[in-house]
Amino acid sequence: MIEARDVSVAIGGKRIVANVDFDAPPGEIAAIVGPNGSGKTTFLRALSGDLAYSGEVAINGRNLSAMKPVEAATVRAVLPQATTLSFPFTVREIVRLGLVGGRCGALPGEDQCLPERALARVDLDGFAGRFYQELSGGEQQRVQLARVLCQVWAPVLDGKPRYLFLDEPVSSLDIKHQLIIMDIARDFARRGGGVVAILHDLNLTAMYADRIFVMHRGRLAATGSPQQVLSDELIEEVFDCRLKVGVLPAANMPFILPQSAA
Amino acid sequence: MADHSIAGATGIMAMAGDRSRRARLVIVLLCVGLVIAVLLSLTSGASDASAIGVMHNWLFGALPGDAALSARDRLIIHDIRLPRIILGVLIGASLAVSGAVMQGLFRNPLADPGLIGVSAGSSLGAVAVIVLGSTMLAPLTSALGTTALPLAAFCGGLATTLLLYRVATRQGRTSVATMLLAGIALAALAMALTGILIFMADDRQLRDLTFWQLGSLSGATWQKIGSVGPVIVLALAAMPFLARGLNALALGEATAGHLGIPVQRLKYTAIIGVSAAVGASVAVSGGIGFVGIVVPHLLRLLIGPDNRYLLPASALLGAALLLLADAVARTIVAPAELPIGIVTAVAGAPFFLWILLRKRGVIDL
């Protein structure tokens, strides 16, 4: 269980996140949505321990600010938005970095081939020998996800759930890989872990999220299941855009929803 | 795809993208190379003293027909060449490893203690002791003895590195442009202060300073090895413990932290280690440039950027290359000798330009 109580974050004297209460139980995908600049990433960075915050954050009942880096690394892995490198690492070397700190939770003997298995899961079979810097943005994003998966390979370790923090995990991916990545997140949750994801695609959010946190100007504007949260009024208020939920476009206009995936 | 993949250099079963086997092989070859470089250095020089004769003498007694080794040869080998070789190995290793660690710390292949002002800061500390050692800093030098010089060089290097890191890093991101420019500014400041000290120096000190600044191993004595050797060995011994953290740091400070690396501690250990190693090196041999940038770069092409292998390989190659450079410096204008700093700069500066040309458009300033 991840519990955040009354979390506020100020950067350079400016309050970016204000009084956010947040719960992400294991077994669920908690999606954070909101317009650009609403404080989503800042909140996730506070949750990851990168930024100083006021309020309380606890992971599995332990206070985050009292955890050492290696202890935090054992219970959660963080996927940043984009990662650039200045040295010519191979894909395999990058994915292996997921095993550098904590305990991945793989069975004995399994960890040698873990990079290959993680790469296969993100549909990058055969990419281990490629240079990271030569890959496309979407491929790099999936390599980083493979690294993150290695770090918390077992969703439950010592009887305690572990968590994936994903900052826009599908933003640079094509539709097939968006679905693959979201399926990985759902599978991680089904097997007892927890997922916290910042998402922009409201259709994907409605399809995969168990609960949604809507952020607006640094504050929590709404919380609840997709059915409770995604309403015409909320979208107009938060995204400043007059949209209707569940309205089909005109008959001759093609539209493709992720929900239609077979 | 095949032309992009790297298979391990040895073994059929090597996993794609895993260069650890190749790296180990390269390290073994570098060990052999270093031994060869040491033997070459023992036998080469202005004098024809034969190291083989000396070694045979140590191990098995005098060679048949060569009744006894001349006292002169023994003196040349024991008291001139051997300390010089040991010092060369220590300094070459220390400069190359410091370069590699600094590049990992700044996440940039162009970071180098000489280039970004750390060496200039160390020089300032050292020059201060040389010039003011008998006057203003007399209490310090009399209290610390021979360690005063390396200690002052260490403090100068440490102050520069800390200042540089503060200036160039904002919110965990190190701006390379800021780093290089701040390095130039700090180096200029350190050199200006050094200039004031040189202005104050007397004729004898002046001559010492000039040769020292050009960089040379010619002053090598067992006593100098005794005063800086432990510092360098200690700093070098600490570096391998940073390797995993530096690898994670390649992904950025925040991500390294998420992976469980205590980033703050890593950074300060690296800065102190580099300052100690560079400070000690500069204190005895002056400014020997480009070893720290050329050696790690060559090795990254060969074995990749994994610091677990890059750091030991850099130590070995740095030591071997500096011995070779010193052999050139000793023999090319024999019986006089060229400052080794000139040799490394003549070879290293064009190499550095070549890196820039190759990476044009890739290095993000």
Image (cartoon, coloured by chain):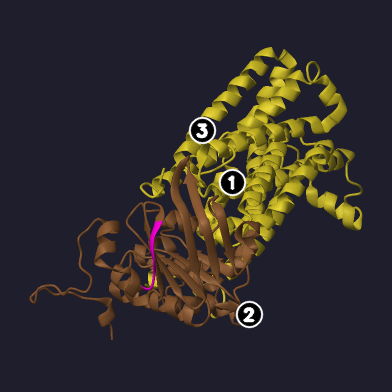
Chain colours: A brown, B yellow
Q: Which residue is mark 3?
A: B182
Amino acid type at mark 1:
Met
Q: Is residue B275 left or right of residue A29?
A: right
Mark 3–mark 1 Cα distance, whole angstroms, equals: 15 Å
Amino acid type at mark 3:
Ala
Q: Which residue is mark 2?
A: A159
Q: Which residue is mark 1?
A: B102
- Queried whether the magenta region covers residue B293, the answer comes back as no
Q: Main secondary structure of the magenta part?
A: strand
Residue range corresponding to the magenta coloring: A220-225
Q: Element under label 2?
A: loop
> Nearest the camera: A125 or B264?
B264
Query: Residue extending furthest left?
Result: A252
Question: Pointer 3: residues within 10 angstroms few (<14), some, or many (20+)?
Answer: some
Question: Pointer 1: residues within 10 angstroms few (<14), some, or many (20+)?
Answer: many
Q: Residue at x 92, y 55 (%)?
A: B61
